[in-house]
Amino acid sequence: MTILSTTDLTKTYGGITANAGIDFELPEGRIMALIGPNGAGKSTFVGMLSGRIEATRGTVFFDGQDVSRLPAHKRIALGIAYTFQITSVFAGLSVHENVALAARRRLGRDAKAVNAKVADVLDRVGLSSLANQIAGTLSYGHQRILEIAMGLAQDPRLFILDEPTQGLAESEIQDFITLIKSLADTITILLIEHNMDVVMATADLITVLDAGEVLARGTPDEIRDNPAVQAAYLGTDDAEG
Ligand code: ATP
């Protein structure tokens, strides 16, 4: 089943076409990576999916419903969560409090339900032992994992991860790969990612954007072997290998 699809999704800024008529389908329960060179239009695309950016033209369907005109908070309530490139963690609050804030967006003020959700999510991402630590004193890698926890606390059906491994050390990236794969047991994931090792290790499917258009889509093997992708994006090393 397709959980999310777009037709003719388009965004123009004055004379710049950031997204040009994107048709896209995301099967439920899969990890889809969205890749492409800088300025290809990835952030614009997911901004229109989440409702942070208003589309110039086109439609977004989520779970069979046209959500194109819904504001971001209504799309969150339907089950679309996203993390930003820029950290959204409250540095002065504890890990527990940060996740509780996110959980309350969906569960309201039911303290018992919120606490249960926080415990469940922290366990899932491996942060339980740090629940009482002030978020600002966490390592950068743990802060990125906390962001994931905050997204999970909203019980998403689709989780959009915007460059989750940016700025992480190589040792932290391995943990992230394991975490992302474990999430896909229950959640559909759309991953914007520049690190091709992470993409190849996690994605079931890849969509390549270039100059605001879909250049290619397919499995990691198909994308790796696609000459147009190699020319536009992966560079000569991969093209020869
Ligand atoms: P990156 O990987 O660098 O984040 P991206 O693939 O996410 O890039 P976008 O940020 O979506 O690409 O940008 C696509 C195009 O739209 C670029 O040419 C960019 O300059 C332009 N653009 C994005 N946002 C705006 C804006 N608010 N006003 C004008 N032009 C914009």
Image (cartoon, rainbow, N blue to C red):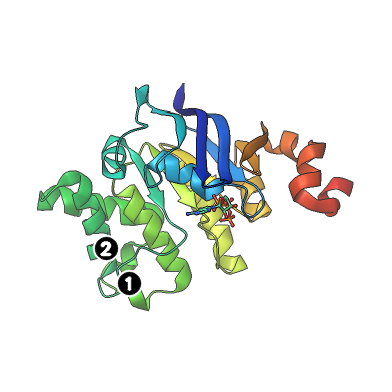
In terms of image quadrants, where is residue 92? bottom left
**Of label 1 and label 2, which has the lower sequence position?**
2
Q: Which residue is mark 2?
A: 98
- Dot 2, how many residues are within 10 Å of its Cα: few (below 14), some (14-19), or many (20+)? many
Do labels 1 and 2 touch, CB within 8 Å?
yes
Asked whether residue 43 is in view, the answer is: yes
Disc number placed over residue 222 in the picture, else none: none
Q: Is mark 1 within 8 Å of ligand 1?
A: no
- In space, the residues marked 1 and 2 are separated at their CA atoms by 8 Å
Asked whether residue 116 is in view, the answer is: no
Q: Nearer the viewer, residue 134 or 124?
A: 134
Placement of 144 over or under 196, stated as above or below: below
Q: Please state which amino acid type lies under the numbered disc 2.
A: Asn
Q: Is residue 116 left or right of residue 213?
A: left
Percent x, y for residue 178?
Answer: 53, 52
Q: Which residue is mark 1?
A: 135
Hey, which residue is sitting farthest right in the picture? 240
SS at mark 1 in the image: helix
**Figure label count:** 2
Percent x, y for residue 196?
Answer: 67, 52
Q: Is residue 109 left or right of residue 40?
A: left
Q: Nearer the viewer, residue 214 or 222?
A: 214
Q: Nearer the viewer, residue 166 or 183?
A: 166
Placement of 58 over or under 112, stated as above or below: above
In terms of image quadrants, where is residue 56? top left
Hey, which residue is sitting farthest bottom in the picture? 137
Hey, which residue is sitting farthest front in the picture? 15
